[in-house]
Amino acid sequence: MPETITMEVWRYRPEHESEPTWDAYDVPLRKEWAVLDGLNHIKDQLDGTLSYRWSCRMGICGSCGMTVNGEPKLSCSTFLTDYAPGPVRVEPMRNFPVIRDLVVEMGDFMAKLPAVKPWLVSDDEPDEDTEYLQTPVEMDDYKRYSMCINCMLCYSACPVYALDPDFIGPAAIALAQRYNLDSRDAGAEDRRDVLASAEGVWACTFVGECSVVCPKDVDPAGAIQRYKLTAASKAVKDLLLPRGAR
Amino acid sequence: MSTGNAVGGEPPLYRPPVSLTWWLRNPSYLLFVLRELSCVFIAWFVVYLLMLVYAVSSGRAAYQEFLDLSANPLVVILNVIALAFVVLHAVTWFGLAPKAMVLRLGALRVPPTVILAAHYGAWLVVSAIVAWVILR
Ligand code: SF4
Ligand code: FES
């Protein structure tokens, strides 16, 4: 194994340049080093001006998403040795405006998320002492969707989001389904207008890349397709059945 | 706090341009573009079918004209390409079905492969019926 690997890092410093540039750094190639460790080495030893986000270093916080050799990845869970002998190209996540270097602006997602009401909606004011029991089978229905860490890799992989920024997007829909499919939730009807709109599930044409890149196996593509069927059958019922029988 | 060229306000965001060849970057992007394109060929098949119906209803001469048109090599090539796109559309559509349909038998989830197989089975049955009606 060579001793070092070259990391080519995408740089954008708005006070210096209006167009991005590339900087190359040689970092030690160690078996246990992830791309994030390489970036930390650069920041600590070589160039303190490099900006990027990270926190947990263990695939939990969802803040270290980047484009590594063209693919959306969590940089803390992507190992340098897998790219040896290099170089490794590190870019900001695609489909987002860039604030600086590898730091993207995700205000768009933050603005869309509340629209799908990602919380438990209940019909009546819950009594403080009430326990909401749930069987393992019921939990199984939504558990997968609850694993989302809001890393945005799915948005960065989605060509529909790139072409139509109004698309609510994979994670927001998966999170809506996380609550829709929860036996304790009564908010499905509230979420329907947004989910069943042209910017909701119907914008998706099932490219499927969101589920491929998701580091938590949330399967947002599956969540979206499943809701398409729900939305379509609801619409048919609305058309055919009298109000009381829906 | 502001520095450099960003006088009084946030520094400008950089919006990377979408490259013209983005759809070549990944096979599934290419498939996505081809599937979007398939709608043109599906529309052509609808038009072609309507032309057939019209020709049949307007008598022998019109029908013969339709047959001659269909035998034109250009039309044959167009139809072969269109068929390929329609098959692509159908196959990817079926691939999506098990994702959309989550069926439960009691506590057990019907495996996706069974749902997929059922779709292809139904396709086969319908095709067999159509073939029987046409060829008998
Ligand atoms: S669905 Fe997966 S890829 Fe998308 S934000 Fe959540 S964890 Fe990240
Ligand atoms: S640093 Fe938290 S997910 Fe990578």
Image (tube, rainbow, N blue to C red):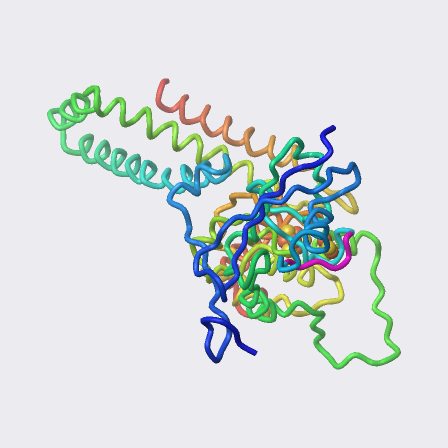
Instruction: Give the dominant element type of the magenta stretch: helix, strand or loop.
Output: loop
Residue drawn at point x = 63 percent, y = 39 percent: A6
Magenta-span inclusion, residue A54: yes
Q: Is residue A144 above or below residue B124?
A: below
Among all residues in the image, which is located at the extreme left? B61
Q: Which residues are magenta?
A: A52-57
**Residue beneath the point at 16% across and 21% down:** B68
Q: How many marks?
A: 0
Left or right relative to A202: residue A118: right
Q: Is residue A139 left or right of residue A71?
A: right
Residue A225 position, x and y percent, is 57, 49
Q: Is residue A109 above or below residue B41?
A: below
Q: Among all residues in the image, which is located at the extreme right?
A: A129
| Residue A147 visible to an observer of this rendering | no
- Residue lying at 67% horizontally and 49% vertically, measured from the top left: A74
**Residue A91 highlighted magenta (yes or no):** no
Percent across and percent down for residue A206 are 52, 45
The quadrant of the picture occupied by the C terminus of chain A is bottom right
- Up the image or down, B132 lies above or below B88; here it is above
Answer yes or no: is residue A74 visible.
yes
- Which of B133 and A5 lies nearest the eye of the viewer? A5
